[in-house]
């Protein structure tokens, strides 16, 4: 009888723990991990050197530019004392603006500007090579394939420095495809 009670209690504990794990997983938040984590796989020339292309882009300098004289001047005209701390500016100059603290991994650093995850979504769950090799699995794990809607969240007339935005032209300027395999 005692063994049966112990078994029932153990099974009950197991069911509770499993239920808690499932509930936690269902409510799990994809985390922003930072572009440095993307560099591991997306830096080699043979794979398109996507990280290098990003690191040399204006997107990578988006947070840094907020400390420039021009940004301070524009900020002042908008009633912003420090563009690097103003929500008005940060919403388009950093990755993960407005995301909850638990959605930002320890490795995440907003000073990287507009990083990979601004366009492709928080990478914690799709970063593994086994997931990335399967586009549908990567999408299910949070990967976003950006489109014009992604870009115009920031490239719009709400920006004090807005100039006409042509998605096709802009996309070509930042394109970073994986090279086709030679046959």
Image (spheres, rainbow, N blue to C red):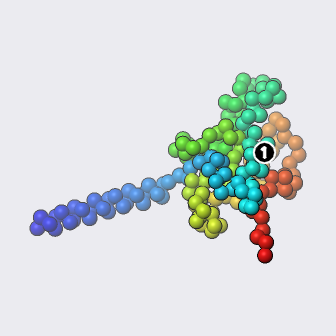
166 displayed left or right of 31: right
- The residue beneath circle 1 is 56
- The residue closer to the viewer here, 134 or 101, is 134
118 displayed left or right of 12: right
Against 57, residue 3 (above or below) is below
Name the residue: 84% across, 37% down: 161
**Residue 48 place in picture, x, y as percent:** 76, 59
Does the rendering let one see residue 20?
Answer: yes
Check the image and name the residue furthest to the bottom.
Answer: 183
**Residue 111 place in picture, x, y as percent:** 67, 37
Name the residue: 74% across, 54% down: 50
In the figure, residue 96 lies in which quadrant? top right
Which quarter shows the N terminus? bottom left
**Residue 66 place in picture, x, y as percent:** 75, 32
Name the residue: 69% across, 50% down: 116
126 displayed left or right of 12: right
């Amino acid at each position: 009888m005692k063994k049966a009670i112990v078994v029932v209690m153990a099974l009950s504990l197991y069911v509770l723990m499993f239920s808690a794990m499932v509930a936690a997983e269902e409510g799990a938040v994809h985390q922003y991990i930072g572009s440095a984590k993307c560099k591991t796989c997306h830096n080699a020339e043979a794979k398109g050197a996507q990280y290098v292309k990003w690191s040399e882009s204006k997107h990578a300098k988006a947070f840094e530019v907020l400390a420039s004289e021009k940004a301070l001047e524009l900020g002042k005209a908008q009633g912003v004392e420090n563009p690097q701390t103003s929500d008005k500016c940060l919403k388009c100059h950093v990755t993960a603006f407005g995301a909850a603290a638990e959605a930002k991994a320890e490795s995440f650093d907003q000073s990287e500007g507009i990083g990979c995850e601004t366009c492709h979504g928080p990478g914690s769950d799709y970063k593994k090579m086994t997931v990335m090799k399967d586009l549908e699995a990567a999408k299910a794990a949070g990967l976003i394939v950006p489109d014009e809607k992604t870009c115009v969240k920031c490239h719009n007339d709400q920006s004090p420095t807005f100039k006409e935005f042509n998605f096709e032209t802009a996309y070509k300027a930042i394109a970073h495809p994986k090279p086709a395999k030679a046959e």
